[in-house]
């Protein structure tokens, strides 16, 4: 199970540094790039109810296997797209693959955690971030060595597929679930507030993934290898935050961890945007990674959060087109600040607070 979380993060970390290449090859403006990246989120969101139904019908083990192969197969396709419509289709398929794997492996991880007898979900998500760090670091190394982007991403997809196949025998056997209620439930009442936090969290996380390399390479003039270090730093800090999250929440409480994390992330990235230097930007992305680390939305709140993931790419692109990418990332700083205000909701409603894992 741990290998699959790592592989998913590593695959995404391998893809993110090549977003500027896609922008250059197809001559995309910031706004059009935002719309193109929207296809990834749209594919992921479309996969949610379908994969949920498949997990209920066939069990999470079988669905996780199929989703892992789909994700690996789709990973290099955006770099092979000869035109913009084909690029949109490739990005949508990549989003479907990563969304399907995300849902299926998290469902299976719940079973593993139950069998294990103590909370380990944060560790799984920490391994996802470690995978993102590894993928971005390897992408940076490949760029520095002059390896063609498609060669790097195809090789990464092949290795990750082998790793996923090797992990299959260790997955727990699962049976179809007996579903008495609806598979898809929108948050209602007080859960709307938690859904809003999830929306902000996934919007900010998606912005770091989609735009960090573009900002470093296009706006700050960094090399391709240095641009890859932005997402690597973000993933490293998020991994550290997630792996220590359970202890922090136990000592200080969920509300304090969420509020302090949001303030830290927003302040660090805000200062980096004012400095407008590559090294400062890398530190800013790391600060945001640590700040967002312990917002891991699940269940109904996760569904709401995906709308932030869906809206984030085009919103950043449109704002960047109208003003600048610096201003657009400043908008992320502002909305993350709202997460600190939402922290008190967790303190007042401990039962619902379980929907946000630290």
Image: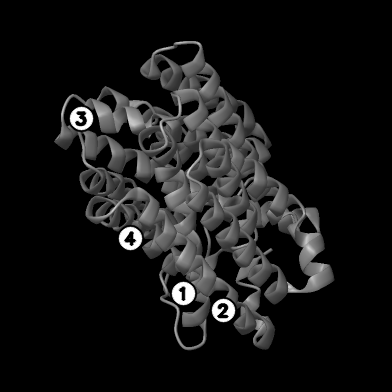
Crowding at mark 4 (Cα within 10 Å: few <14, some 14-19, many 20+) = many
Report the Cα–Cα distance between label 2 and label 3: 40 Å
Say which residue appears at 55% left-offset and 64% top-offset.
Answer: 298
Where, by quadrant of the figure, is residue 67 drawn? top left
Evaluate if marks 1 and 2 touch, with contact meaning CB atoms under 8 Å apart: yes
Where, by quadrant of the figure, is residue 164 drawn? top right
How far across and how far down the image is residue 35, in percent? 24, 49
Which sits earlier in the primary sequence, circle 2 or circle 3? 3
Which mark is drawn over residue 311? 4
The residue wearing badge 3 is 26
Residue lying farthest to the right in this orientation? 251
Crowding at mark 1 (Cα within 10 Å: few <14, some 14-19, many 20+) = some
Q: Circle 2 — which element?
A: helix
The residue wearing badge 1 is 196
**Label 4 vs label 3, nearer the camera:** 3
The residue wearing badge 2 is 342
Q: Circle 3 — which element?
A: loop
Q: Is residue 105 above or below residue 229?
A: below
Which sits earlier in the primary sequence, circle 4 or circle 2? 4
How far across and how far down the image is residue 282, in percent? 56, 40
Which sits earlier in the primary sequence, circle 1 or circle 4? 1
Evaluate if marks 4 and 3 touch, with contact meaning CB atoms under 8 Å apart: no
Q: Circle 1 — which element?
A: helix
Q: Is residue 25 above or below residue 314?
A: above
**Label 1 vs label 3, nearer the camera:** 3
Front residue of 77/320: it is: 320
């Amino acid at each position: 199970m741990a290998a699959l979380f790592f592989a998913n993060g590593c695959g995404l970390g391998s893809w993110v540094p090549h977003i500027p290449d896609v922008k250059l090859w197809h001559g995309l403006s910031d706004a059009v790039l935002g719309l193109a990246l929207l296809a990834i989120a749209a594919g992921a969101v479309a996969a949610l109810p379908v994969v949920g139904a498949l997990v209920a019908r066939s069990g999470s083990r079988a669905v996780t296997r199929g989703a892992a192969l789909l994700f690996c197969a789709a990973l290099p396709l955006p770099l092979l797209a000869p035109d913009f419509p084909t690029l949109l289709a490739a990005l949508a398929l990549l989003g479907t693959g990563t969304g399907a794997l995300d849902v299926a492996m998290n469902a299976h991880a719940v079973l593993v955690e139950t069998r294990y007898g103590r909370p380990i979900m944060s560790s799984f998500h920490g391994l996802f971030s470690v995978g993102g760090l590894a993928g971005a670091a390897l992408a940076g190394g490949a760029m520095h060595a002059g390896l063609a982007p498609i060669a790097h991403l195809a090789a990464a997809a092949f290795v990750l597929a082998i790793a996923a196949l090797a992990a299959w025998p260790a997955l727990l056997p699962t049976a179809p679930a007996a579903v008495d209620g609806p598979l898809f439930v929108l948050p209602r009442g007080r859960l709307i507030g938690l859904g809003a936090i999830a929306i902000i969290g996934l919007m900010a996380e998606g912005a770091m993934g989609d735009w960090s390399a573009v900002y470093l390479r296009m706006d700050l003039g960094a090399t391709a290898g240095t641009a890859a270090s932005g997402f690597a730093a973000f993933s490293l800090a998020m991994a550290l935050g997630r792996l220590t999250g359970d202890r922090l929440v136990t000592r200080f409480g969920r509300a304090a961890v969420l509020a302090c994390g949001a303030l830290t992330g927003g302040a660090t990235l805000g200062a980096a945007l004012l400095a407008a230097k590559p090294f400062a930007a890398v530190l800013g992305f790391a600060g945001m990674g640590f700040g967002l680390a312990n917002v891991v939305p699940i269940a109904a709140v996760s569904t709401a959060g995906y709308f932030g993931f869906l809206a984030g790419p085009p919103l950043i692109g449109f704002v960047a087109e109208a003003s600048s990418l610096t201003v657009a990332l400043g908008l992320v700083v502002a909305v993350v600040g709202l997460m600190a205000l939402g922290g008190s909701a967790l303190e007042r409603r401990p039962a619902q607070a379980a929907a946000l894992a630290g």
